[in-house]
Structures are given as C-alpha cells and as structure tokens.
Amino acid sequence: MTALEHVRDLTRVAARAASSKGGEDTVVLEVGAVLAICDAFVLTSGRNHRQVATIAEEVEAQVKAAAAGRSPLRIEGREQAEWVLLDYGDFVVHVFLEETRRFYELERLWRDAPRIEWEDALDRK
C-alpha cells in the first residue's frame, strides 16, 4: 500500500467517524497536488458546539484505533468548538459549526480538488 492509499484509508475512517456522530455534509478532498503541506482534508460540520466536540472526539478515537494508536500532531479549537482542526500531518480533519463552515467556505476555495469517496454503497441508501 502506498502512502497516499494509506492516507485515503484513514480519511475514510475519519469521515465515517464524523458521520457516525451526526456530522453533516462530510467531504474528503485530495489537496496534495496543490497544497504541499498535506495530502487531504476531511470537512464536516455539526449543529451545535457540543456536537462539534463529540464529532472531533470520535474522529480522534477511530483514527487512533485504525492506525495503531496514531494521534493528531496538534489539535486547535477544541475549547471553542466552532472549528476544531485535527492535524495528522498528511491529512487534516476540519470539524465546523455549521455557520462557521458557511463563513469560511473551504469547499469553494478547494473546489478543483478531487473528492475521495468515503461512503460505502450501503451507507448511501
């Protein structure tokens, strides 16, 4: 498995973890071709501060379980829970409060980045 395939697998784990806690409009963007500092972004949002914090905690727990104890290199925004950033080095998970996500519009900024499918066919039904 290549390093990029491993990143794709872990971003899928993160996206599914977010979805399991009610994360909305979850997308995975492959940004490595245009952004030298990481390979992918996971973007998701919650309806309130508590849900944002819960989603971030679940992502952290599930990535740790799937990747032999791997933890984020740094976490920002946990206290405010408006935009929690989990930086894993080769990918970054952004958990937004809905209105914060609409304000920053990261999907618009990275609209040319390819999307990584993360939902299984059964999940979409």
Image (tube, rainbow, N blue to C red):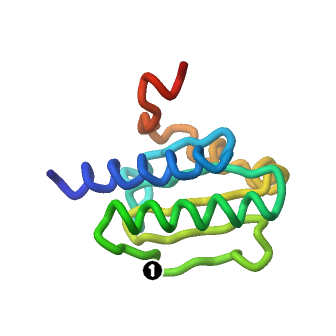
Q: Residue at x 17, y 53 (%)?
A: 2
Tell me: 97 left or right of 21. right
Q: Residue at x 29, y 70 (%)?
A: 68
Tell me: 19 left or right of 98. left
The residue that label 1 is drawn on is 73
The amino acid on which the numbered mark 1 sits, given as a three-letter code, is Leu
- The relative height of residue 81 versus residue 25 in the rendered view (above or below) is below
Percent x, y of residue 13: 42, 51
* Quadrant of residue 50 within the rendered picture: bottom right
- The relative height of residue 51 versus residue 73 in the rendered view (above or below) is above
Tell me: 68 left or right of 17. left
- Which residue, as the protein is rendered here, is positioned at the far left? 1
Percent x, y of residue 17: 52, 51
- The relative height of residue 47 versus residue 95 in the rendered view (above or below) is above
| Residue in the foreground of this view, choosing between 107 and 83 | 83
Q: Residue at x 32, y 55 (%)?
A: 7
Q: Residue at x 78, y 56 (%)?
A: 97
